[in-house]
Amino acid sequence: MAVHPSHRAALSFPSGNAKTGPIAVSSTSRLTCPSSCPLAGNQGCYAEAGFHTRLHWDRLSRGQVGATAVAFIRQVIALPAGTLFRHCVAGDQWPDPVDPLRIDQALLLQLARACRHLRAAWSFTHYPMCPENQAALRQAAAKGLVVNASTESRSKAAALVRQGIPAVCVVPSDAPAVFHHEGVRFVACPACRSGAGPRIQCSSCGGRFGLPLCAQADRPFVITFPAHGPRAAAATAHCS
Ligand code: SF4
């Protein structure tokens, strides 16, 4: 059977990304980005804003680097036990070939099973949180891959957390590090906080023995990402 053009990904380990630290990271093809993502293109997508990230993403999306989803999953299986893995630094989950707004659940669960030997694995998605996509996220989390619902609306993020779906939310750059909205706590990503304390990366997030916050599927709070960089204004325009 022909491989769907969006079903590609590239793995990098250890990452040289300053925010993640030396963990395993991946990108998926730009063709995975659903039309439901309000940040797509020049609307605030941070992956489009980084020069080197965008060049790599262009090449991956043209099929010049990376691997098919199935080959990529084999690479994840081969990662050393205990590795931390952040999936989709750029790109989104692989779409169902017959419904571009539905996550390909079978492929996502195949990847989740490939993560079982890892210390933690997490990702993000801008797919609409319809019941089918929520079910895909719950099943992936149960197998070891926590996919966070990405939002720009505090009310939507709060509602998702109340339903048991881990959520993250882009907020304006001047939002407080910790605040409450509709009874739910919002906490800024430690790697985005400035301050005098030690610098936190995904590799050290959650404390020495804890799990990175984004990999905690049952956390009762929303993680916020303050809009930053050259497309901060465009991203902020989508915040509510
Ligand atoms: S909250 Fe932690 S795991 Fe999530 S992006 Fe920030 S540093 Fe990484």
Image: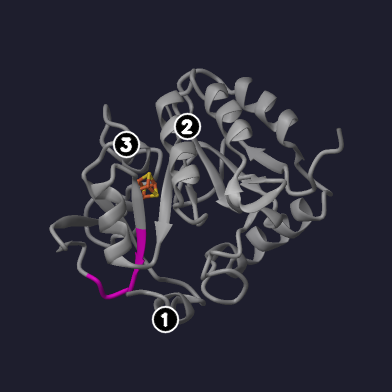
- The residue sitting at 27% across, 36% down in the picture is 218
- In the image, which disc is placed on residue 139? none
- x%, y% of residue 106? 61, 31
- The residue sitting at 25% across, 57% down in the picture is 158
Mark 2 CB lies closer than 8 A to ligand 1: no
| The C terminus - image quarter | bottom left
**Going from the N terminus, do you reach mark 2 or mark 3 first?**
2
Determine which residue is flagged by label 2.
Answer: 140
Classify mark 2: residues with Cα within 10 Å, few (<14), some (14-19) or many (20+).
Answer: many
Q: Can you tell which quarter of the image residue 42 is in? A: bottom right
**Amino acid type, mark 2:** Ala
Determine which residue is flagged by label 3.
Answer: 216
- In the image, which disc is placed on residue 237? 1
Mark 1 CB lies closer than 8 A to ligand 1: no
Q: Which residues are magenta?
A: 169-175
State how far apart marks 2 and 1 are (Cα): 32 Å
